[in-house]
Amino acid sequence: MAKEFSKKFYASKVWKDCRNQYASSVGGLCEKCALEGLEVKGDEVHHKIELTPSNINDPNISLAWTNLQLLCFKCHQAIR
């Protein structure tokens, strides 16, 4: 569940477009599972550098593809 400070960001069109384009660019599969040779549908676009109140408005953190990773539910839960 999104933290209170990030709910508006995660509901925004700019995030939804970024998330969808990123997921499509990596083929829609979990990137961690793919490293193990598994083809598992990705469910969550994860920020490698966690969003905080001080960096959420920095597009170099919140929207940069280099800070994103598509994960399945299981892999995302394992790192949370």
Image: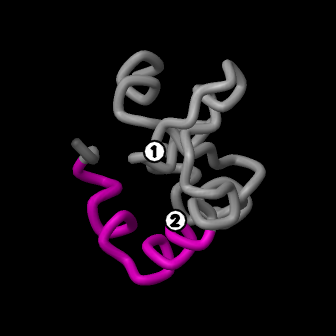
Amino acid type, callout 2: Arg
Residue 41: numbered disc: 1
Point out residue 26 in the picture as x, y percentages from the top left corner: 68, 55
Residue 45 drawn above or below residue 72: below
Residue 9 drawn above or below residue 4: below
Q: Main secondary structure of the magenta part?
A: helix
Amino acid type, callout 1: Lys
Instruction: Judge left or right: residue 4 versus residue 42.
Output: left
Among all residues in the image, which is located at the extreme bottom?
Answer: 13
Residue 16: numbered disc: none
Query: Residue 15 in magenta?
Result: yes
Neighbor class of circle 2 (other Cα within 10 Å; few <14, some 14-19, many 20+) is many
Instruction: Judge left or right: residue 5 versus residue 17.
Output: left
Query: Residue 5 in magenta?
Result: yes
Q: Residue at x 41, y 83 (%)?
A: 13
> Along the polypeptide, which appears first: circle 1 or circle 2?
2
Point out residue 75 in the picture as x, y percentages from the top left corner: 46, 24
Instruction: Judge left or right: residue 38 versus residue 9.
Output: right
Range of residues picked out in magenta: 4-21
Instruction: Look at mark 2 in the image and give the residue it sits on.
Output: 19
In which quadrant of the rendered image does the C terminus lie? top left
Neighbor class of circle 1 (other Cα within 10 Å; few <14, some 14-19, many 20+) is some
